[in-house]
Amino acid sequence: MKERIIKTIATHIALSAEEENAIGTFWTEKTLEKGDYLLRNGETCKTDNFVVDGALKAYYINAETGKEEILYFAIEDWWATDMGSFQKQKPSMYNIQALEQTTLLQISYDSFQAMLRQIPKLERFFRIILENYLASLQRRIILNNTLDATQRYLDFLENYPKIADKVPNYLIASYLGISAEFLSRIRKKNEAS
């Protein structure tokens, strides 16, 4: 299972066999059952988490409406971590919950720092991951401000087909900032066209 994370890292930086072996020693496996929490609001994010198999949702509860608002989904070969909480070792503002049985590779904060000291070139890998995350977050903000709900939904289907196949529509609606009923109307209209 640890080969998955090594393979992912190797797509961005070259690793020696010795470095590959060393990386594997820092990570531990964890399985969550459907509905289990990886992180709850108010807890400190103790681990960085690489999804080997399964799906998770990250969300917060809107204080005004009491509704769950989806921040992101994480599926195979994605990361599911509150980076602010993990890096600062401060309480999280949101929850991360398994949508189905999910297998993770986890690394604690102290082990993460030790791994970076032992293999400094991993700093480059994690910088690339963070840059990609930041770019997708910026893109999401711009699309939310410029596209209507139908266009956002079609863009989601085009860019995240694997998530669309795994995640219930009411959660996709929350991610898009629309009601489940409105998403149902959009889907029916698109199927009719």
Image (cartoon, rainbow, N blue to C red):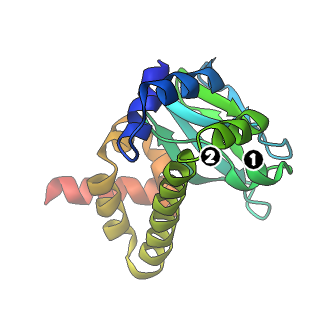
84 left or right of 13?
right
- Amino acid residing under circle 1: Phe
Residue at 42% from the left image edge and 74% from the top image edge:
143
How far apart marks 2 and 1 lie (CA) works out to 15 Å
Disc nearest the viewer among 2 and 1:
1
Nearest the eye: 21 or 127: 21
Classed neighbour count for the residue bearing mark 1: other residues with Cα under 10 Å, few (<14), some (14–19), many (≥20): some
Of all residues, the one furthest to the left in this rendering is 193
Q: Is residue 94 above or below residue 34?
A: below
Q: Secondary structure at mark 2?
A: strand
Residue at 69% from the left image edge and 38% from the top image edge:
112
Residue at 73% from the left image edge and 33% from the top image edge:
111
Residue 17 placement (x, y as % from top left): 43, 25
Identify the mark nearer the N-term, 2 or 1: 2
Nearest the eye: 187 or 57: 57
Q: Is residue 101 above or below residue 23?
A: above
Task: Give the residue number, with chain letter if any, for mark 1.
Answer: 86
39 left or right of 5?
right
In the figure, residue 34 lies in which quadrant? top right
Nearest the eye: 91 or 100: 91
Split into 4 quadrants, where in the image is the C terminus?
A: bottom left
Residue 77 placement (x, y as % from top left): 43, 36
Tell me, yes or no, if residue 53 can be seen here: no
Q: Is mark 2 in CB contact (under 8 Å) with mark 1?
A: no
Task: Give the residue number, with chain letter if any, for mark 2.
Answer: 58
Nearest the eye: 121 or 42: 121
Q: Is residue 148 above or below residue 80?
A: below
Residue 185 placement (x, y as % from top left): 34, 58
Classed neighbour count for the residue bearing mark 2: other residues with Cα under 10 Å, few (<14), some (14–19), many (≥20): many
